[in-house]
Amino acid sequence: MTGMKLEVTTENVDQTMQFANVLARRLQGNEIIELIGDVGAGKTTFVKGLVAGLDSISDVTSPTFAISNIYDDGLLPVYHFDFYRLDNNDEMIKHELAETIEHDNAVIVLEWAQAMRNVLDRDSIKITIQAPTENQRRFSVEIPQAYNYIGTSE
Ligand code: ADP
Ligand code: MG
């Protein structure tokens, strides 16, 4: 099974927003995107760029307390989950996620989802974020074969 790997380094928040914007433009719906990285890595910043890239004017905030936010005024509905504060065995939240990923066309974006992998019914795009310096962020994007359209150049 061949997928793709893409590495992008940004130098500031604007470039991260720009990168997320470009990626957003390639989404078709029904994608699951997992963001992996420490607190402050830039996961939520990336989601801001993604949502803006879908022409939504929603204000993206960290859903750490709400668990999930929905941005549905753009080209595709974005469901943004952050499981940071979650007990790994919270069956209600697992159920909510399982129901959400069935929504047609939705883009599902997950922070701290390692414990949720068994709920996912398909491959996810994994974006690992590292911070080599205070303002640099390195994005390693793993795109499974099912999403190869994201990496092609048309
Ligand atoms: P997370 O959701 O991973 O905890 P946030 O997106 O909330 O991270 O925060 C990222 C922090 O890193 C913000 O304070 C942002 O200003 C800062 N930052 C510095 N450089 C960058 C960059 N190149 N890309 C994204 N965020 C950056
Ligand atoms: Mg966050």
Image: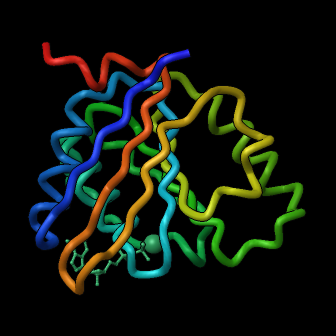
Q: Quadrant of residue 100?
A: top right
x and y percent of residue 62 in the render? 45, 73
Q: Image point 49% across, 26% down: which residue? A: 144
Ligand 1 shows up in the quarter that is bottom left
- Does residue 10 appear left or right of residue 137 in this picture? left
Q: Is residue 131 above or below residue 69?
A: below
Q: Image point 26% across, 68% down: which residue? A: 137
Q: Quadrant of residue 11?
A: bottom left
x and y percent of residue 127 in the render? 43, 50
Color encoding of the figure = rainbow
Between 92 and 24, which is closer to the camera in this rendering?
24
Q: Is residue 8 above or below residue 142?
A: below
Q: Image point 30% across, 25% down: which residue? A: 150
Where does the C terminus fall, quadrant-wise? top left
x and y percent of residue 47 in the render? 34, 57
**Tag count in the figure?**
0
Where does the N terminus fall, quadrant-wise? top right
Q: Is residue 143 above or below residue 11?
A: above
- Does residue 55 appear left or right of residue 100 in this picture? left
The residue lying furthest to the bottom in this view is 134
Q: Quadrant of residue 122?
A: top right
- Does residue 146 appear left or right of residue 53 in this picture? right
x and y percent of residue 65 in the render? 59, 78
Q: Is residue 128 above or below residue 143?
A: below
Q: Image point 17% across, 42% down: which residue? A: 55
